[in-house]
Image (cartoon, rainbow, N blue to C red):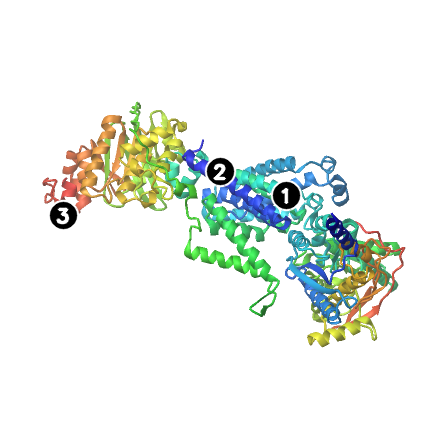
Amino acid sequence: MRKLLLSTTIAATLAALPAVADTLRVGVATAQTGALAYADVPVSVGMHLAVDEINAAGGIGGKVTIELIEKDVRSDAAQTSIATQELVDQGVSVIVLPCDSDPALAAIGVISSAQIPAISTCASSPTLPMIGGEYMFSNFPGDNVQATVSAQWAWDQGHRSAYIIYSPDTQYTTMPLYFAEVFEKLGGAMAGQATNTIGQQDFSAIATTVAALDPQPDVIMTSAYEPDFPSMIKALRAAGVTGQIIGSDGIDSPTTFSLGDVAEGLVFTTAGHPTPGSSLETFNTAYEAARGESPETVFSAVGYDLIKVLEAAVLAVDGSTEPTALRDAIANLENVQGATSLITYKGTDGMPVRQVSLIRVKDGDRELLGQPSPDAALIPAPRMQ
Amino acid sequence: MITSPRLQIFAAISAIVVGVVGAALIASMFGAAAERILTVFFITLVGVVGIGIYSGNSGILSFGHVAFMGIGAYVSALLTLPAQLKVATLPKLPDWLATTEMGLLPATVIAMGVTALVALLVGAAIGRLEGSAATISTLGLLIIVHGVIIGWRDVTRGAQSFFGVPRETGIWAAVIGVILALVLARLYRDSRSGLRLRAGRENAIAATAVGVNIPRERLISFVLAGAVMALAGALLGHFLGAFSPKKFFFNDTFLLLAMLIVGGMTTITGAVTGAVVITLVTEFLRRLEGGFSIAGFDVPSVFGTTQIGIGLIILYAMFRKADGLAGLKEWEERVFPKRPPSGSAPALQEVHVSDSLTASNMTMQFGGLVAVNDVSLTLTPGEILGLIGPNGSGKTTLLNMLSGVLRPSKGAAIRGQNKLNGVPAHKIVEHGIARTFQNIRLFPDLSVHQNVLVAALSTHGGEDADSRARAALARLNVAQLAGESAGTLSYGDQRRVEIARALACRPSLLFLDEPAAGMNRLETDALMDTLRGLTRDLGIGILLVDHDLTLINQLCDRIIVLNEGRLIAEGTPDDIRQDPAVIEAYLGRGKPGKKTKPKNRDEPGPATELAG
C-alpha cells in the first residue's frame, strides 16, 4: 500500500511538472514542388538557416533544439491535409503550412481537432486565420494591408484612375479587389477590371482591352505571379499600355528582375528590404556566408522569420513545447525581431502586423520607395472573395 | 443472375469480408496513423475497382472515371458542409442547398445517384465509340468535368480549396465502402451483363452475332462504375476535409490506372493486387523522399521519387506480365475451377420453324470493288446448302450480309415475314440465324462453358440458358473441356466450341464458314456426322462454306457457286460437278474435260477436291 501511494505521488509530481522537452519538433508540410514551390523552396532554405543558427548556439534558450520534419505537399490541398495529419500523428508541436491560403485551409480540420498551432510560410490572405480559427497563423503582411500601401502610394503619386486584373482562382490573386476598394475610398476612379485564370499563358485579349481604353488608366494593378505575370506584363507593354503597373509580393523573384525593359518602373509590395543597417541586410550577409550566394528573394528571410517567431514563443513559455501553450504564446507575441521586420501577433486574429516595403524595379535592380505604415482606417476588412 | 459457380462467388465474398475486416482490426491495434493509412488505401481501392468495373469488363481504358469521383466528392460535400460555413464561403448558393445539412450516409447515397445520372448521359453519348476513340473520349470527359468544377465558382469555389467538409470517413466507413464496392464489382463481373460485356471485349463481332447488345452492356457498366467512383469520391472528401479540383485530375487518374494495370484490369484479384503493390511501394518511396541515411551515407531529399517509382513498376509489369500481376483469372477461379458437368446432358430441342431465308439480289460494294454482285438464294430449315467458290469470290461477304455484320449495298434478305436488312446485328440471332466465322472468333479468355453460356443467355430471353449451353457442348462432344480457357484449345476443338456456341442460341438456320478448316480427315468425318445429325434430328438448316469439296459434296443437298462475286451455278452436287462454268472457275479455261471425270473420292490430291 505504501509502495502504491509512493508511486502515485511520484507520478502525480511528474505530471505536475511543466512539459519540458529538449527538442521542438516542427512539422513542415510545404510545397517543395508545384506552383507554390517558387516561394516555399526559398522559405525552407531560410528556415534551415535559422534552425542551424539556433541549434549551433545550443538550442532555444540554450536548451531546446529544433527538429524539422519535412513533407512535400506538391502545392495541393488534399496532399496538405494528408501530410498534416501524418505530422500530427508523429507528435509534432507546431506545423508549418504552404505559402497560400488555399492548401493551408485544407489543414484546418486536422490542426483544430489536434489542437496544434500552424503557421503558413507566407500566405498573405487575411481570411486564412479568420476562417482557420484560433490555431491558424500567418507569417506575412496581409493582402488587405499590402493593397492599402500600394493604393495609397498610387494616389500620392497623382494617379487618379486604375484598372485591375485579378484571378478568382485563389484568395491571394484577388488582392486587386482590396486595392480597388482602398483606391475608391481615397477618391480614385476604377477604369475597369478583367479576370484571368491561373496558368493562363495568353494575355493578349486582356492587353487589347486595356490598350483600347480611352482615356488610359493611370495604374494597372494585379497580384498575378509566375508564370502568369511575365506573360501578362509583356502582353500589356506589347499592346502599347504605358501606365504604371503595380504588383504584389508574389513577383518578388529573380524572374521579375530579369524581364528587362518591360519590367522597368514596375512597383510592388513585399515583406522587406535590406536597407543599410537593417536586420534584413544582416540576414543577407549571414545567408551569403552560409550558402556562398546572396538570397534571390525575400522569401528566405520570411522563412527565417518564422523560426524566430517559434523561438520567441518557446522562450515565452519557458522552454515548453506543449502545443496549446505554444499557441497561446504565439498569439501574444509582440515585436519579435525577424529578418525582415518586427513581428507582432498580439491584438490580431493571427494575421501578423509587419512592415510592408514598396519596391520599384530600376535598371533591373530593386529600389526602395518606402516602408510606410498604412492608415488603419483605410485597411479593408478581410473577406472571402 | 450470377453465371459463375456459387462456390466461387461464396469464396470471393468471404475472402473480401474477412480480408477487409481483418485488415481493419489489425490496423486498429497499431493506432490512428495505421488506421488512416488503411482508410486511404480502402478508398483508393474503391476507386480502382470502380474503374475496373468499366475498363476491365469492357476492355476500354478509361481516363475519365476520376471525374465521377470528383462529382461524388463535391455533391456529397455540398450536402454535409455545415450550413454556417456554406453561407460564409459560398454566398451564392441557392437557398435550399445552403440550408441543407445532412449526414455522410444520405449524402453519399445522393451523390452516387446524381453521379450515376451524369454517367448515364455521358455514357449514352460516348458509348458507341470504339478502341482508342473511346479511350480518348473519356480523357475529354475528365478535362470537361475538371473545367466545369473550376468554372462553377458559386457552387464549387472554383480552383480554390473546398474546405470545412466534416471529416466523417473513419476506418469503418471505409470498410463498409470498400466491401460494398468489391462485392458489387465481383458480382457484376459474373452477372449476365458482365459476362456479355466481357464476351464483347474478347470479340465484338462474335458477341454481337450471339445476340449481345454491346453498347447497352457498356452503358450499364459505365453507370455502375460511375456510382462506385462517386462512393470513392464521397469517402475521400470526407476523409480529407478539404480538396480542390486538382485532386480529381491527372495525378490520381494516373495513380488509379497504374494500380489497375499493374494488378490486372480484368479481375477484382488484380485490382486488389495492384492497389496493394503500388501503395506499399509509394508509401515506402514517399518516406524516402525526405532524405535518409544508409550505412552512414546520407541520401539527400529528392522530391518526386514516388512518381518515378510508379512509372518504373508499370514498365516492369508491362515487360514481364502484360496482363497484370494477377493475370486474367480471379484467384477463386484458379482454386475452385468449374468442374465439367456430371450426369447426362439435356438434349437440344428440335426446330419447329419452317420459314425459309430468302435473299434476293444481294450486292455489296466496297468503293469501286463489287465483292458480291446480284446474288439470290434461299435456305430452308432441314436442308444443307453448300456455298463454294474460289478464294475471293465473295462467300464470306455474302455470309456477313446475311448475318447482319455487313449492310448490303443493294438487295434484301427476308426471313418468313420479316425483312432482315434494317435489323441490327445483335438482333439477327433472334430471327433464328446463328453462325461461325472463317477465322475463329471465340472469346479466348473466357472458359468454354462461358463462351457457350453467353450465347444461350443472350438469346430467347436467356430461358433455359444453362441447359441449352450444356446440351450444345454435349452435342459437339466438348463438354469435358467446359472449364478450359477457350483460347488454349486445339484448333479443331476451337472450331467445335464455336459451333456449340452457335447451337446454344437454338437457331433454326446455321451459317458455318469453313468449319473443317485445319481439321484432319478423321475430324472432318466426325464433323460431317455431327452436322448431318443437326439437320436430321433437329431440323436445322445449314449454310455451309468450305473449300473441302469432299465435305461439301457428301453433305449438301444443294450447292451454289460464286465466282468474282456472281452466282455462276446452283444445283445438286452432281449438277455442280459437271457444270462447265464451275470447272472453268476452279481450274481455268483451256483444259475442259480433263478433270471432270469423278475419281475415287478417297484418293487424296487437289483434283479430288473438285471431283469429290
Residue at left offset 24%, top offset 26%: B537
**In-front residue for pair B225/B177:** B177
Q: Are marks 3 and 2 on the same chain?
A: yes
Q: Which chain is home to disc 1?
A: B
Please tell me in which quadrant of the rendered image residue B114 appears: top right
Coordinates of residue B385 in the picture (x, y in percent): 24, 33
Near mark 1 (Cα within 10 A), the count class, few <14, some 14-19 or many ≥20, is some
- Would residue B144 be visible to someone looking at this image? no
- Mark 2 vs mark 1, CA separation in Å: 23 Å
The amino acid type, in three-letter code, at marker 2 is: Ser
Side of A141 relative to A26 (left or right):
right
Q: Which mark is residue B590?
A: 3
Q: Nearer the viewer, residue B508 or B420?
A: B508
> Circle 1 is placed at which residue position?
B170
Q: Earlier in the sequence, mark 1 or mark 3?
A: 1
Q: At 37% from the left edge and 46% from the top edge, which residue is drawn?
A: B367
Q: Find disc 2 in the rendering and name its residue.
A: B14
Chain hosting mark 3: B
* Label 3 secondary element: loop
Q: Residue A197: percent from the left, percent from the top?
A: 68, 54
Q: Are marks 3 and 2 in contact (CB under 8 Å)?
A: no
Q: CA distance from mark 1 to mark 3?
A: 87 Å
Q: CA distance from mark 3 to mark 2?
A: 75 Å
Secondary structure, mark 1, is: loop
Kindly identify the amino acid type of the residue bearing the numbered disc 3: Gly
Sequence order check: which comes first, mark 2 or mark 1?
Answer: 2
